Amino acid sequence: MKLFEKRATKVSRREFLVAGTAVGGGLLLGFQPALAQETGSAGATSINPYQAYLRIDPDNTVTILSAHMEGGQGVDTGVATLLAEELGAAWAQIRTESVAGNPAYYGNMVFGGTLQITGGSTSMASSWQRYREAGAAARMMLIAAAAEAWGVPADEVTIQKGVIHSGDHISNLGDFARAAARQTVPEQLTLKSRADWSLIGNASLRRPDSGAKVRGQQGYTIDIDKPGMLTAVIQHPPRFGGTVKSVNSDAAKAMPGVVDVVTIPRGVAVVAETYWQALQARNELIIEWDESSAEKRGSEQILNEYRELAAARGGITVTLNGDGAAALAGAVEVIEAEFEFPYLAHAAMEPLNAAAQFKDGRLQLWGGLQIPDLYQQTAAQIMGIPPEKVQLHPMMVGGFFGRRATPNSDVISEVVSIVQQLGTDAPVKLQYSREDDMQAGYFRPMFVHKVSAGLAADGSPLAIDHQVVGQSIIKGTLFENMMMQGGIDPSSVEGADKLPYAIPNAELRLTTTDVQVPVLWWRSVGHTHTAYVVETVIDDMARAAGRDPLDYRRGLLVDKPRHLGVMNLAAEKSGWDTPLKPGTGRGLAVHESFGSYVAQVVEVTMVDGQPRVDRVVCAIDCGIAINPDTITAQMEGSIGFALGALLDEAITLQDGKVMESNYDGFPVLRINQMPVVEVHIVPSTQSPTGVGEPAVPPLGPAVANAIVAAGGPRIRKLPFSA
């Protein structure tokens, strides 16, 4: 089965604007490709019902239907801001709702528009044009309806703060929602000029989801409790690649509340009336595992193999500029460095979960649907039903970080497999424990880098030879054919393959390893390790040349104005040239990822030989700042997220088994470790780019560089506590 079958011919936006009347008589507006139709068994066609970007109800509520899923990153706020700005709505009347089930309407525009996905820090770039256009079309249709009713020219009607005006005529948006739905969609849309924006760039907007969260009323998948709902837990193999050989479930089935025990492709599921009953019964399972093909190596053994591969300097050449070997041979000084990065868990606040119900030939699916099209297709395949019989219910998620964007639809396929095995029409919720979430996969891959960097007599860089060794995230998945080129997984080398620095000779090679530990994109993906390597090596070169790290970078970035812009801003705001007390140092790093440019200056104090991060000054250039407060929050959150991984976090294997099981062994950053963070946004007229991930990569090297400046050691094995 083709998981991503193109359902529509690409046409211009003006050709596929459609309008209709929503339930309740409101205005329903969306972009629908003219050929996006489903064919029934009799050969007749009907328009796919998922076609809207907004709904205006008679009570004057404006509901923004978001193509991107909210997981705490503020995407609902951003999408709502874009549409509400053009519509002329009042912020207080805005509601948001995530929608899924039709890539023709909700496909991510950054990835070509054929797949709905929330990831890669692309939500605002994907939404920037179409949601403003949806708002503008709705505004123009409402104005046309009001002009007809009032008998005035349309150019005398305006919409401001949710109210339609013309002379003595005043009405709410909801008053004309039904009439607007009958208007012809305008052929040409007029978007507001930047001077007329009141919401885009407004730092005081309150997030639509903040009230419910503060009151503890926000619903997540973990909170779902439907009538007759059963709860399932899974016993996964203790080693990756293991399979079920035999199960004795007699004792588990005899326990109170247990409904059944079923074997699914990824393990053994216990289904009970409550979560606690299922969890207790799982302890009574007697499972014999077939581990003939399982991963049995420990972390240190895998690392040793990676070190040998890195020393061999083999693999596939990713980039080759000049003659690195000759340049290194003629260098007056060569810096040799080896870096080690561990497996990392995502460790989101809400452990993995999903819920499903199969009744009357239709499957209802609830969860964190980061790639809903894929999950819809996977669920349909498991149940043996057409995809249109799978109804998706996107839920607010307690943290993504990439974990719910799995090519194999892991937790979704698990809950659907359980429902299929049970043969019940009762709703079933699959809930991971924290231990399940930490130990059952997926992880940021382990990597080893080996670098040789040569300097000329004047201290300028002559060459960099860079070897990368680690697992591919996309190899063996359905994304391999789309993303992998010449055996190179771009997520393994991104951030190192296109150096911004003017270095005449550079070679980058990749050795992709074969390990059965399941790996996945982790907030900022490959940039998490490549930025650390590049930015600490550049710092080492500056120090070897006897140069200030800031001035050294300036000389190498003369043709990179956006890199220079954020770096100079961060340096200025940090007081780069001001003296610090003994034992304290400043470190700098600048990095581009997801279309955005971030520089950070970090102040570190060495206390009894250990680093204490005191202050982070962060500058970002992400194009037009749609929601400045959201950008600031993402910078702060990313810095905390990255700092925790830098200091203490690691997933380790012993004989193939994950040793960490909860936050005690995988200590995310504590509040007392959080530094003072100052965020500065570069004013821009460029289209918006990502903010969810780009602040993660520079934090690590900036801290590492500050430690050296404070008189501490150069740390090349992460985490620092290792």
Image (tube, rainbow, N blue to C red):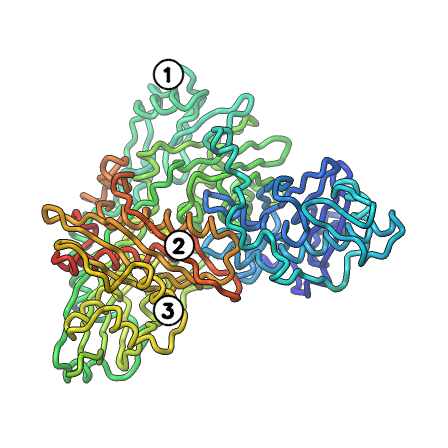
Q: Rounded to the nearest whole Å, what is the CA distance between mark 2 and mark 1? A: 46 Å
| Image vertical order of residue 267 relative to residue 623, above or below | above
Q: Outermost residue toward the left?
A: 608
Amino acid on which the number 3 mark rests in the picture: His
Q: Which residue is disc 3 drawn over? A: 563
Q: Is residue 293 visible?
A: no
Q: Is residue 205 left or right of residue 155?
A: left
Q: Rounded to the nearest whole Å, what is the CA distance between mark 2 and mark 3? A: 17 Å
Q: Residues within 10 Å of mark 3 (few under 14, many from 20)?
A: many
Looking at marks 2 and 1 on the same chain, the residue that comes earlier in the sequence is marked by 1
Residue 574 location (% of width, % of height): 30, 58
Q: Residue at x 65, y 44 (%)?
A: 90
**Total number of numbered labels?**
3
Check contact, mark 2 vs mark 1: CB within 8 A: no
Provide the secondary structure element on which disc 1 rests. Answer: loop
Q: Residue at x 31, y 68 (%)?
A: 496
Residue 113 location (% of width, % of height): 58, 59
Amino acid on which the number 2 mark rests in the picture: Glu
Q: Is residue 34 visible?
A: yes
Residue 1 location (% of width, % of height): 54, 53
Q: Rounded to the nearest whole Å, what is the CA distance between mark 1 and mark 3? A: 62 Å
Amino acid on which the number 1 mark rests in the picture: Met
| Image vertical order of residue 59 relative to residue 682, above or below | above
Residue 346 location (% of width, % of height): 34, 45
Looking at marks 1 and 3 on the same chain, the residue that comes earlier in the sequence is marked by 1
Q: Which residue is disc 1 drawn over? A: 255
Q: Which residue is disc 2 drawn over? A: 693
